[in-house]
Image: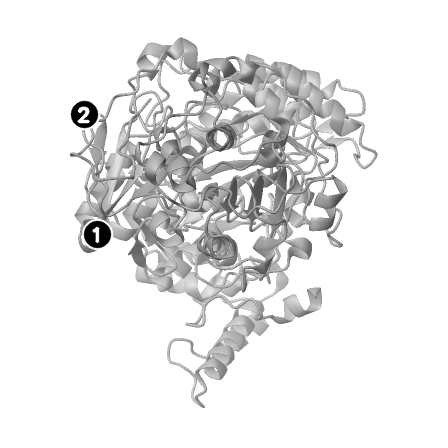
Amino acid sequence: MVTNARAGGASPGPPEFVPLRINRAASEGGDSARLPAGQKGASERRPAQGDPRPLPMTRREMDERGWDAVDIVFVTGDAYVDHPSFAMALLGRVLEAEGFRVAILAQPDWHSCEPWRTFGRPRLFFAISAGNMDSMINHYTANRKVRNDDAYSPGGRIGRRPDRATLAYCHRAREAYKDVPVIAGGVEASLRRLAHYDYWSDTVRRSILLDCKADLLVYGMGESAIVEIAKRMRNAECGMQDARPLPDSAQSDALAGWGAGLSIQQSSLGIAPSRTPWRDIVRSLRDMRGVAYALGAKEAPPTGAEVVTLPSYEEVKADKLRFAEATRKYHLETNPYNAKTLVQRHGDQHVVVNPPRLPESESNMDRYYDLPYTRRPHPSYPEPIPAHQVIKDSITLMRGCFGGCTFCSITMHQGRIIQSRSKTSILREINTLTSDPAFKGTISDLGGPTANMYKMVCTKPEIEAICRRLSCVHPKICPLLGTDHGPLIDVMRETRQQKGVKKVLVASGVRMDLARRSPEYMRELTLHHVGGHLKVAPEHTDDRTLALMKKTRPEDFEGFSEQFRDISKRAGKKQYLVPYFISSHPGSTVESMIELAVFLKRNGYRPDQVQDFIPAPMDLATCMYYTGLDPMTMKPVHVATRLRERKFQRALLQFFKPANYFTVRRLLLDHGRGDLIGDGCDALIPSRPPREAIESRRQEAERIARRSGAGERPASVAAPSESEWDLARSMSEDEDHYHSTGRRPSGGEAPDSNAGGARSGGAGYRPGRRSGRRRERQ
């Protein structure tokens, strides 16, 4: 294992880092290969099934179980849903199966620390997460406008969690019990473990570890890490034989004692609290994979050949070139088989990020998903949880993604190596699902981060152990990547044959370049697993932008579409593709968006959903957005940073909406594409504005005038002229491009749908703020 400097006296000098020697054969057993000798093989045994009731959320539920204390309190920004798609349920059930007493503190009132005292002092630690989503992305749109709903809250109501929830929750936990360790995790903490660009404040922020004051940060998928932490803390507390050695200072440190003040007659494991100082116990966990921690000002950072020193926080904040350099360095250290430890200085402290954990074995994946989830929200919620409604009848086949898309955080969070469940475990979960009286016979999704990467792994483990590619499929599919769809096809067929299953849909995004390699998979998918519409994500049509995204070529989308249409036509099925596109991604220009709009018009696509690019922390595309540089090549990249251009690009993607008519017309004229304005079939927009466009323009002008508080209309939005009204009145239905159903082969949005919002004001997120729509819901 890796050895680090531990607190406790002055270090004689920077410690030398010992490289991790990885036995690939042993690592196939997952993280069990790193457990103490007495626990070898534990991950291969199916754990004892836990309590079929949901984990306790109140003191009363805790008392009903006969508990006098809990070992771990999970604090989460999501409503508690006991389903494996929700992190707190998955981690809580895994710990429960290992014999720990776990309680859930879901969406607590963060204005005081009293909710953190609900269950009394936890014997081991607080586990803090903002939830399944980053709290800032959960709260704000791409244009920094407050969202109208929260899919992870009862009834979809907003205001149930704070901005930067990890910070608020960690501070309250520390305030409630100063001598209880605080472990941060989840996607928000994971992607902020180093200095990062924060889109919402438009600044470079330091590592979240230094702001939230957590004792340890677990990044990535945390099942094996949280179990190892809990066991080692329990063992250290109990003085068991397999506890890891503590620093010498632990013998002389005269702290009050780990667990002091617990008012319990008997611990949950029948062992009295130890006098071992809790800070030293936490420091002993610094040799774990998949964790990050902050060193004290007097602690020397690790050094050696297995350490990569990143540009400091002060450097990346002051110099965008150094920011791009740091981004490139840490993205090259994501392969768990060869990643090095990262060190980044923040003032007089250092943040250390250990290498990622090894991928989970199939047996471990099965154990995690075989646990007795109720698959329902906690019964205390009077209203449904929208996110649960979407995934309640879905089945997860695998985790991880080797696509490496620069705008996506999945690879950085779940890893590039695919970790799949066995077919037996999948069918067992389906049988559990079909036995539920509430199940209606349709499995809503059979997939994961991607629909068709199940069981796909590198065929040369010895090469994989030294590989540093960020994507296995870009710019071309690696010849060493196993792309056999056979195991997935087998699962799909057997799933359909299960008793009680009427229909199995695939709602996860299909990787088109992989799917085209398997005509059998294309037939299976198209004939049996499409409910009328199939989601795909070409994202763009511009070669330069696609290269910056690390996405497939336009030819892959066209070839996939042709195969899909041909199979559907032969089977007599009316099925359509629903393509997803991103506007304002780094590299995307107004000119390239015009070409994308032409492509959409020629192929009859009218995107229902358009995703404006959101610069999420730690993504490569976020670095491009902030620095204007591709961090892998250091070449300049065009970036749409101004709200005006971002709205222009979105309008071009939805050129068919009357509300966008004048914006699109202006852009086409400004860029010399007046040939796309007219009444022919090749025109993007008609020569005369539709009635809705003029009405929308009038309403926008009045809205801006009211907002500005001035009597005069702002020059940026002119009122419609009399000639424009005359043109609209004279337009017949036959000339109306927007209402002709014959020109809408793929469906599309209603012409009067909202086209997006403007930047929010300086007040920021206000939980008490309610729009008319939210007032109706409440």
- Tag 1: Cα neighbours inside 10 Å, few (<14), some, or many (≥20)? few
The picture quadrant where one finds residue 751 is bottom right
- Residue appearing at x 34%, y 55% in the figure: 673
Residue at the disc numbered 1: 347
Secondary structure at badge 2 equals loop
On the image, the x and y values in percent for residue 291 come to 38, 35
Cα distance in 3D space between marks 2 and 1: 24 Å
Say if mark 2 contacts mark 1, CB within 8 Å: no
- Left or right position of 434 against 392: right
On the image, the x and y values in percent for residue 1 come to 33, 21
Residue 293 appears in view: yes
Depth check: give the residue in front, 517 or 229: 229
- Residue appearing at x 67%, y 22% in the figure: 48
Kind of residue at disc 1: Gly
For the view shown, which residue lies furthest in the bottom direction? Answer: 711
Residue at the disc numbered 2: 305
Depth check: give the residue in front, 278 or 588: 278
Kind of residue at disc 2: Ala
